[in-house]
Amino acid sequence: MTTTRQKTWNALWVPGWYELDQALAVGEERRFWFYQQPPSDLPKVESCDFVFFNQLNAAANCQVRTARVTGIRHPILGELERVDTDGLDYHFQPVGGEAIRVNAEEDPGSVFDAPGDMPSIDDWSVAVELADVSQPITLGANS
């Protein structure tokens, strides 16, 4: 039996907080916004094909593509099911674990009700694996 490995791309998601970020969920396929040229203050990742756009920067520096999220990984939390960015708190959902509520408004990056054994996290960036990435989409006036 022959199996073919589907092409995947590596992306970086760096929070801008304040409800400026795109939500992520493993298995979800939809339109995502990516930087054309990532800002110089973002971490450099050698094996990164895309960097998710957030609204801290000019929209003229973004491109839209459809893609399917096949994996989300935080260097300390491990594999995540999703990152919910709706509201004044973000929720990072580890696979098989309880959601971690992180402030995104008054003290961005601080954790609410952290488990006693949870290490301190200074960088909430996540690596995202994508599949079925389209070419850039030209959006019309009504898109």
Image (cartoon, rainbow, N blue to C red):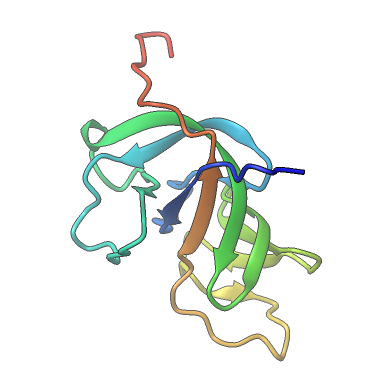
Q: Is residue 40 left or right of residue 74?
A: left
Is the C terminus in the top left, top right, bottom left or bottom right quadrant?
A: top left
Q: Residue furthest right?
A: 96
User: Which residue is pictured at 35% across the width and 9% down the height?
Assistant: 141
Image position, residue 87 (x, y; %): 58, 48
Q: Toward the viewer: 66 or 118?
A: 66
Which residue appears farthest toward the front when viewing the image?
Answer: 1
Q: Position of residue 78 (x, y in %)?
A: 63, 72
* Horizontal and vertical percent position of residue 30: 57, 30
Which residue is depicted at the point 78% across and 68% down? 98
Foreground residue among 2 and 24? 2
Locate the N terminus and report the quarter of the image it occupies: top right
134 left or right of 69 in image? left
Residue located 56% across and 54% down the image: 88
Give left or right: position of 89 versus 140: right
Occupied quadrant, residue 113? bottom right
Q: Residue furthest left?
A: 40
Badge count: 0
The x, y position of residue 110, in whole percent, is 53, 74
Q: Is residue 86 at least partly visible in the picture?
A: no
Q: Residue at (51%, 42%) from the top-left corner?
A: 7
Image vertical order of residue 63 relative to residue 98, above or below: above
As drawn, which residue projects farthest toward the bottom?
117
Towards the viewer: 100 or 51: 51
Residue 65 seen in this snapshot:
yes
Up-down relation of residue 28 to residue 12 (above or below): above
